[in-house]
Image: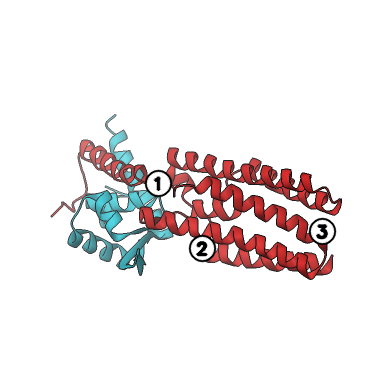
Chain colours: A cyan, B red
Amino acid sequence: MAGLDPLIHAPARLRLLTTLTAVSEAEFATMREALDVSDSVLSKHISALVTAGYLRSRKGTLEGRRTTWVGLTTQGRRALRQHVAALRQLIDGVD
Amino acid sequence: MESTTPPRDPRDARAELAAADQARERLTDGLRLPSGLHPALAVAVAVQVGTAGAGIAAQTAAGLGVLLAGLAVFLVVAAVSLHRFRSINGVRVDGLASQVVLGSGGTTSSLVYLGSFGAATWAAFESLWWLVAVASVVGGIGYALGARRWWRAYRNDPVAHAGGASPRLLAVIALIACLGFVVLVVVG
């Protein structure tokens, strides 16, 4: 289907990108709880989306412990918007 | 491992979008403001408005010191509040930072702040100290109410209100504000 982004096909990635639209940056464990996924799954998706330029990540701290902070890039925001529009088109095609 | 093939069935697409929205809601529903944020903000802004008015009217080095001390109180309260928000929630929301540091959430709160700042400065020049106090309190309350209004708007539509000035830009703006006040006192 045109407009669907292969990098966002995995539902966990769609959830990850969508959740990040509500904040400027989120910490790894916070995202893991919001998405209800394991550390390794989240880590893998973040790596792929950072490589694609959809996410930016940085090492930081939260309450004294080292952690990773992630946020949407402009490119990621655009890609998500297009992907969601394509999904809505698919839905509207039936409704 | 989750499927990475695109959904062909509209029901799958609908379910994916709903799950994504639910995940975002799970995150935003859990967000909490630090306790005492609004009173702290009101007091910090009242102190800043009052000291700025008195400092500008004094036109002396001591006045400049008072003005900068008031500004420092406000910036420390703002920085601590934002740090606490980040620590409690594990997220950074630039829209909140813009609201807390710049009061940029609404025209009304900006006008109340500017009005109270102007009134406090005028009153200080006229040595009407009771009016300086009243203007400061009004400015502080107006600013805090603006922050509360922004928070409600954010809870209703997080995506539309999450954006704002980055921490780096806010630091630059705070520095420019400090320098601006110094110039105002020195030149005036």
Q: Which residue is mark 2?
A: B167
Q: Residue drawn at (27%, 58%), measured in percent from left and top? A: A29
The amino acid on which the numbered mark 2 sits, given as a three-letter code, is: Pro
Query: For mark 3, what is the residue?
Result: B57
Q: CA distance from mark 3 to mark 1?
A: 40 Å
Q: Does residue A49 appear to the left or right of B159 in the view shown?
A: left
Residue B93 in view of the camera: yes
Most extreme residue toward the left, as rendered? B1
Front residue of this view, candidates B25 and B178? B178
The answer to whether tags 3 and 2 share a subunit is yes
Question: Is B182 left or right of B11, judged from the image as shown?
Answer: right
Pick whichever, B169 or A29, lies toward us.
A29
What is the x, y in percent for residue B171?
57, 66
Whichever of callouts 2 and 1 sits on the residue coming sooner in the sequence is: 1
Q: Which mark is residue B13?
A: none
Q: Callout 1: residue from which chain?
A: B
Q: Camera-side residue: A20 or B95?
A: B95
Q: In this figure, which residue is indicated by the disc labeled 1?
A: B32
Of the numbered discs 3 and 1, the one sitting upstream in the chain is 1
- Which mark's residue is nearer the viewer, 3 or 1? 3
Instruction: Give the Cα distance between marks 2 and 1.
Output: 20 Å
Q: Amino acid at mark 1?
A: Arg
Q: Is residue A58 visible?
A: no
Residue at the image position 58 percent from the left and 44 percent from the top: B144
Percent position of residue B130, x then y? 77, 45
What residue type is disc 3 on?
Answer: Ala
Element under disc 2: helix
Task: Establish if B164 lies above or below B60.
Answer: above
Side (left or right) of B22 relative to B56: left
**Mark 1 residue element:** loop
Q: Residue at x 20, y 60 (%)?
A: A39
Is label 2 or label 1 in front? Answer: 1
